[in-house]
Image (cartoon, rainbow, N blue to C red):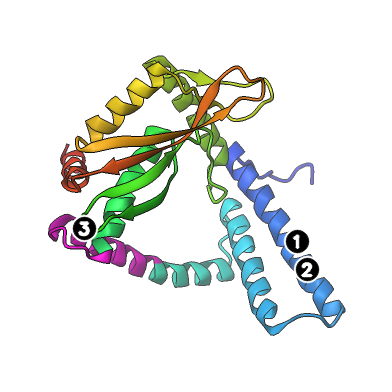
Amino acid sequence: MKNQEKVILNPDQKVVALKSTKELFFAAKQLHDWITEDNLSKKMGGILPSLIESHFTDVAKVLDYNSKLTMEQEERYQEIRRANERIHELEKQLGEQKPIDGLAEQLEYLSRVVSDWWNEYGFHHVSEASFTRSGIYKAKFSFMLEYLSTFSKTPVTDKENRKERIQELIEEGWDILHEENGYSPKLVDNDNNRSRLINLIKSRFPSAKIIRTGNWLTDDDNAFTFRDIEVYIYDLHDIITAQVEEEQS
């Protein structure tokens, strides 16, 4: 073993490999235990092997192990991905080209545009999005400054990017609180941040208004921080217009 070439993984690959092998182990152990106890249901008999195969494939990719199983599974997934990409493209075309007439595909597209913009800015997560009968978009915009997807293939890099973005927000003038208890950083609810939020929302969606805000009191009772803001966009064309301009720039 001493003279054999070692596998060198970067930090992202190592985290993914360890996470996938751990999940692979637990799935295999659960399958083993239920078979031993004659307690394996038909439903789980189909689910667990699929999970094991999926986790094994993730590990194989990180280790650059091009097994027959990996290649066959990749071929199957390629077909599914191509179909999903085609569906996504059709939905996008519907959202961009059709007039605002209440189509489900277009409303989904509009919601996605807003959510993606908020996420990319660095605050992440839009919830309870809906459209009123009079054509007003409304949703809650939350503040999850250190959010990291559990499905990410680059968790270490993502974490570093999040830290950099938080520092950029501070340099832009946002007041962000880092509590001593180690909780995720919070956006302080004060006049400065309220003014910045109004300007940010209005600059992206001119017809939008912040209807109400929700906040938390810090553990030391020294400050209020934003939990979320409820936003109404009165002219849906604001969403489309800005999106088209961004794609053309």
Query: Looking at the picture, which amino acid does disc 2 mark?
Result: Gln
Start-end of magenta stretch: 81-104
Q: Residues within 10 Å of mark 3 (few under 14, many from 20)?
A: many
Quadrant where the C terminus is found in the figure: top left
Camera-nearest residue between 75 and 153 = 153
Q: Is residue 103 left or right of residue 223?
A: left
Secondary structure state at the residue bearing disc 3 = helix
Looking at marks 2 and 3 on the same chain, the residue that comes earlier in the sequence is marked by: 2
Q: Are marks 2 and 1 in contact (CB under 8 Å)?
A: yes
Camera-nearest residue between 51 and 122 = 122
Q: Are marks 2 and 3 in contact (CB under 8 Å)?
A: no
| 110 shown above or below 228 | below
Instruction: Verify whether residue 88 appears in magenta.
Output: yes
Residue to which mark 2 is pinned? 30
Residue to which mark 1 is pinned? 26
Q: CA distance from mark 2 to mark 3?
A: 45 Å
Residue to which mark 3 is pinned? 95
* x, y percent for residue 116: 35, 44
Can residue 10 be seen here? The reply is no
Can residue 130 be seen here? The reply is yes
* x, y percent for residue 45: 69, 79
Looking at marks 3 and 1 on the same chain, the residue that comes earlier in the sequence is marked by: 1
Query: Looking at the picture, which amino acid does disc 3 mark?
Result: Gly
Camera-nearest residue between 234 and 6 = 234
Camera-nearest residue between 225 and 246 = 225
Picture residue at 53% right of the left edge, 24% below the top? 224
Picture residue at 66% right of the left edge, 45% below the top? 7
Q: CA distance from mark 3 to mark 1?
A: 43 Å
Secondary structure state at the residue bearing disc 2 = helix
Instruction: Verify whether residue 107 appears in magenta.
Output: no
Q: Quadrant of residue 131?
A: bottom left
